[in-house]
């Protein structure tokens, strides 16, 4: 499939990277695409959600979804247009889910959110932990470098320096519950990107 001559120079550059990612499983191509658009996507989602934490999460999710479906992209339009559509649609779904969750909590005041979060973490930690540890170090570092500083630091301490939760708490001077909750979110996002990328290796 040839590059659409009507595309801008930047869009043609992106399409060449997409081809490398799809046809060669080039991890640097994935990383470059993420590097080009992560900030713009983040600020778009920040405007939509009004939350820096949600915007960070949704930025990583958007790239995870795009990379998983990247072989479906066609050069009829710019990759950035396709990526922004995925990001905005995912954000809209997130906002809808969040509204439903708020309503559910209002009708279930007895729910203990901390216990629920701890239970979810305990149930899902093992497969993700194992998968992340099994990935190639160079792939891990390429993706982790693209994460926001808060998530990058947690992942580096846990997987590169192999610190325990308690050691991370001492290093960052944070409560154990905060470290577990933030690391759970960081691990979940990283797991999805690594999983999508490894399928193309």
Image: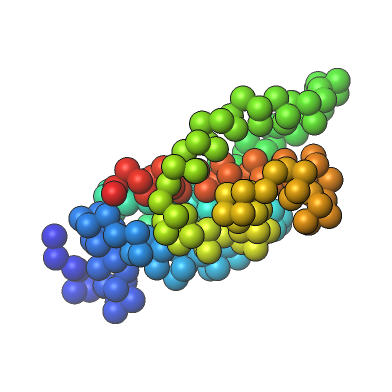
Could you tell me which residue is drawn at 53 percent across and 68 percent down? 40
Could you tell me which residue is drawn at 44 percent across and 42 percent down? 134
Q: Residue furthest bottom?
A: 9
Q: Quadrant location of residue 171?
A: bottom right
Could you tell me which residue is drawn at 72 percent across and 31 percent down? 117
Q: Position of residue 83 (x, y in %)?
A: 41, 57
Q: Position of residue 17 (x, y in %)?
A: 29, 66
Q: Nearer the viewer, residue 106 or 156?
A: 156
For the N terminus, give its image quadrant.
bottom left
Q: Nearer the viewer, residue 112 or 91?
A: 112
Q: How many marks?
A: 0
Q: Nearer the viewer, residue 170 or 145?
A: 170
Q: Position of residue 80 (x, y in %)?
A: 39, 64
Considering only vertical position in the picture, is 170 above or below 106? below
Question: In the image, 8: left or right of 160?
Answer: left
Q: Is residue 76 visible?
A: no
């Amino acid at each position: 499939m040839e590059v659409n001559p009507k595309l801008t120079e930047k869009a043609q550059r992106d399409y060449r990277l997409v081809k490398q990612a799809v046809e060669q499983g080039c991890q640097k191509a994935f990383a470059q695409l993420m590097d080009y658009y992560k900030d713009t996507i983040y600020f778009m989602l920040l405007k939509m959600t009004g939350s820096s934490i949600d915007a960070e999460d949704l930025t990583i999710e958007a790239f995870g979804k795009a990379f998983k479906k990247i072989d479906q992209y066609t050069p009829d339009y710019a990759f950035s247009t396709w990526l922004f559509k995925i990001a905005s649609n995912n954000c809209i779904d997130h906002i809808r889910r969040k509204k439903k969750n708020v309503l559910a909590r209002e009708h279930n005041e007895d729910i203990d959110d901390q216990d629920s979060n701890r239970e979810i973490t305990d149930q899902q930690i093992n497969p993700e932990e194992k998968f992340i540890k099994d990935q190639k170090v160079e792939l891990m570092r390429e993706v982790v470098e693209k994460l926001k500083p808060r998530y990058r630091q947690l992942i580096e301490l846990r997987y590169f320096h192999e610190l325990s939760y308690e050691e991370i708490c001492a290093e960052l001077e944070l409560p154990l519950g905060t470290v577990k909750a933030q690391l759970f979110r960081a691990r979940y996002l990283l797991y999805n990107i690594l999983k999508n990328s490894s399928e193309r290796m």
